Image: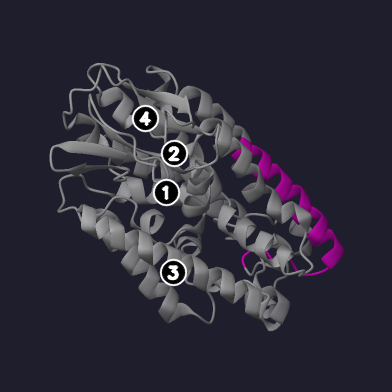
Amino acid sequence: MLKTWIIFVSLLIAGISFAQDDFKPFNDDTSTQTTDEFSEFKEFNNDTAASCNGNCATCPYAQLEGNQTDTIDFSWGSIMMITIIALSLTIIAGILVRFRKTRNYRMIFLLLGLGFFGFYNGACPCMISSFENTILFIRRVDVDWTTMLWFLGLIPLTYIFGRVWCGWVCHMGALQEFLFHPKAKAWLQKEKTAYYIKFIRYVLLIALVLQLLIMGEIFWCKIDPFKAIFNINLNYNYEIISGILVALLLLTSIFSYRPFCRTICPIGITLGWVSAIPGSSILGYKKTACTSCKNCNDSCDINAIMRRKRTSYLDNKECIACGNCIDSCQNCGIHFVRKNKQHPVILFLRRSFKIKS
């Protein structure tokens, strides 16, 4: 019932936003509108606009006609505002996840992320485009520094609070989570399958970085299924590929928990590496409190906790800090700690064990 209301409210927000801005979430200047019914397609004659390098001034969904300087100035303010909101929500979520009563607010945060970053802003800009612009900056491509702040800002926040962005705020993760049907046949659940998923993620991450370094431009925005879903419009010139990706995303999200996050998303894998830094926020547990039950394993939908024979083990690199395992532990044994020799990234949840680094 809760998911039904969440989806209803999300669609309501989407309808309001589309009615207000005619599929152009950053275009508040009505003075530049034209009566030409085909004007919305003229913007694609500009090769720069079609490339969508992560800056909303060149994004096909946000391109404005008229004075280009005004467009860039407006986009700069929009990007800064959205980035500040995203990082602020991440900080608040990082605090709330540490208390039992406030962990119940996670669905509200996901709904806010889905409604604001997703349907209202049309999923552009996003943290993935921020990541890609950071790679382009390393390649010495001329990019606006504001487009990198979202991804770079998440790194220290993840170090301090854990991957709360992924588990609490991310609109892409929220969409998949609300589509997931717990009673459906779950895919990607076995330990061996999880191993191959990690391998695929590394391969795709390397491929993405190589594409950015070789081509010097962002290609993902052209086929991004989330952008197509949140704008209710297949990406121009890539309708077939975009349509296939949308169908795959929607279908797999019903039968598998956050399939995009677990197999493709470059943000999840890079933020997961932060947990390996000494002093970072990770999950640990009290050895005397653990009874080697399956409660934490059964509550972890993202499969950060897996079962090997009669022992569960936790990989903090995969943890999205949702807090479900903390609530499921009957003896309050799982809690947030700082990574050190006593609290490694990968640990086995049992009373008497040897730490494996």
Which kind of residue does numbered mark 1 sit on?
Gly
The residues colored magenta run 61-87
Q: Does residue 198 appear to the left or right of 124 in the view shown? A: left
Dominant secondary structure, magenta? helix
Mark 4 and mark 1: Cα distance apart in space: 15 Å
Helix, strand or loop at disc 1? Answer: helix
Marking on residue 203: 3
Question: Label 4: which residue?
Answer: 323
Distance, label 3 to label 2, CA atoms, is: 29 Å
Q: Which of the two marks, 4 or 3, is nearer to us in this view?
A: 3
Disc 3, SS = helix
Point out the tag, 4 or 3, that comes first from the N-terminus.
3
Residue with the mark numbered 2: 110
| Mark nearer the N terminus (4 vs 1) | 1
Q: Amino acid at mark 2?
A: Leu
Q: Residue at x 22, y 53 (%)?
A: 191
